[in-house]
Amino acid sequence: MKTSEWSATSPFPSGGGNTENKIRVEDCSVHDWYRFVLSFPPHLVRQYLVEFGADNSSLVLDPFCGTGTTNVECKKAGIPSWGIEASPVTYFASRTKCTWKKDTSKLLETAERIAEDAAKKIACSPALKTLSEEQNALLLKNSICPRPLSDALFLKEAIDGCETPFHDYFLLALAKHLVYSYSNLKFGPEVGVGRVKRESADIVGIWFQEMETVRRDLETFSAFSGTRADIFRGDAREIEGDAFRGKVDFVITSPPYPNEKDYSRTTRLESVALGFLKTKDDLRAVKQGFIRSNTKNVYRSDTDDSYIQGISSIKTLSDEIERRRRELGKTSGFERLYSTVVKQYFGGMARHLSNLRPYLKEGAMLAYVVGDQASYFQIPIRTSSLLGEVAESLGYRVEKVETFRKRFATATEDWLNEDVLILKYEGKNHEYLR
């Protein structure tokens, strides 16, 4: 099927709002333990679990699993799943959200003991607890005020000092509220710093209330605690998991889009405060495991563009962006990289789709939630269409493209599609594009 022949349909409510992407109240259990602000919603995952016919004999993969939306939704339905995530803090979040302890009888008792210990540390300390100078340099300025940061660090010390099987639940609750209850951060969806207002907060009390929610959710879904949800930390372009070769029935995922969002910034505060990132070298190592979707994540050694040399439409788009840059006289270092990002992004996705093939069953169905963009000199990037071309060159068949929602782009004052690209793996041996 030619790209121009693909039709976009929508099984979802029409309209220009963003309600389609919001988590529904009835879906908050477990998902809301910690949720990436750009996550796609659980009801969208359910849509495709039903459409694909997934059941407890299936294996579902999310190779860009983020905070585990696909995997948690699968576990709630008793469907085995596998997830891969490159960021250490979101890997930790998805792994924790997919590990359901059946015996929670001592969870609140232990949390209360930790809360008392933290409260004593906070009350008795003659000085505020701080991050290192190098850690502070990684944060957005004024992300969090000194007092709530200090109290949060004392709480982390109390959590780490308690030997308990519930440690990860306790730490994840702290990660969530560092951002949403203790910090000055705001999301729109870009992360930024709002009015510095949270000079104090009931750090321990808010955290303890969250543990009550976690315990309730674990009890609610205890019947599915044994459903497998294997979460690996890794680069989706270089998939590793020998136990899953030839076993994946379905893929439901939302990779990054080619735009100027630095995804590492969105989780920077909790990554640093909880010790997942300590130095600039740590941050660089993490970002090198990401798909190259923005100019702050491109390196001289990158070669992913070599994987899409045979796809002329991507080269044409990249050339158009570079031509527009020259016409506009834009000379900043980031602007010079716009055309490069496009090639590296789609090349990275080609590398991912190629290395994914050994893990798929013949006839496997895949759903990729991707959005059109206009970040680079207002030139439209039709992500689902171009990604479909990449997939077809690697032995996949484009079944359809469904419009999930529309987003308003302030730069172009136009509506952009967020689509679900539906693929079927034909199971054929295709030459890897070089």
Image: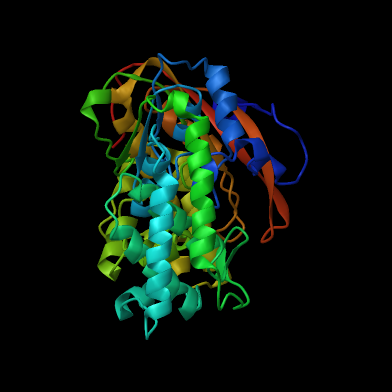
Measuring from the top left, give residue 314's x and y in whole percent: 46, 44
Q: Is residue 1 above or below residue 147?
A: above
Image quadrant assignment for residue 199:
bottom right
Q: Nearer the viewer, residue 242 or 16?
A: 242
Q: Is residue 333 visible?
A: no
Q: Is residue 212 above or below residue 271?
A: above
- Quadrant (top left, top right, bottom left, bottom right) of the C terminus: top left
Question: In this image, 319 relative to 12: left or right?
Answer: left
Measuring from the top left, give residue 230's x and y in whole percent: 33, 32
Identified at 59% across, 78% down, the residue is 196
Measuring from the top left, give residue 271's x and y in whole percent: 38, 61
Q: Nearer the viewer, residue 36 or 348?
A: 36
Q: Is residue 60 above or below residue 146?
A: above
Q: Nearer the viewer, residue 160 or 236?
A: 160
Q: Is residue 67 above or below residue 396?
A: below
Q: Residue furthest left?
A: 242
Image quadrant assignment for residue 6:
top right
Identified at 61% across, 32% down, the residue is 43
Q: Nearer the viewer, residue 20 or 419?
A: 20
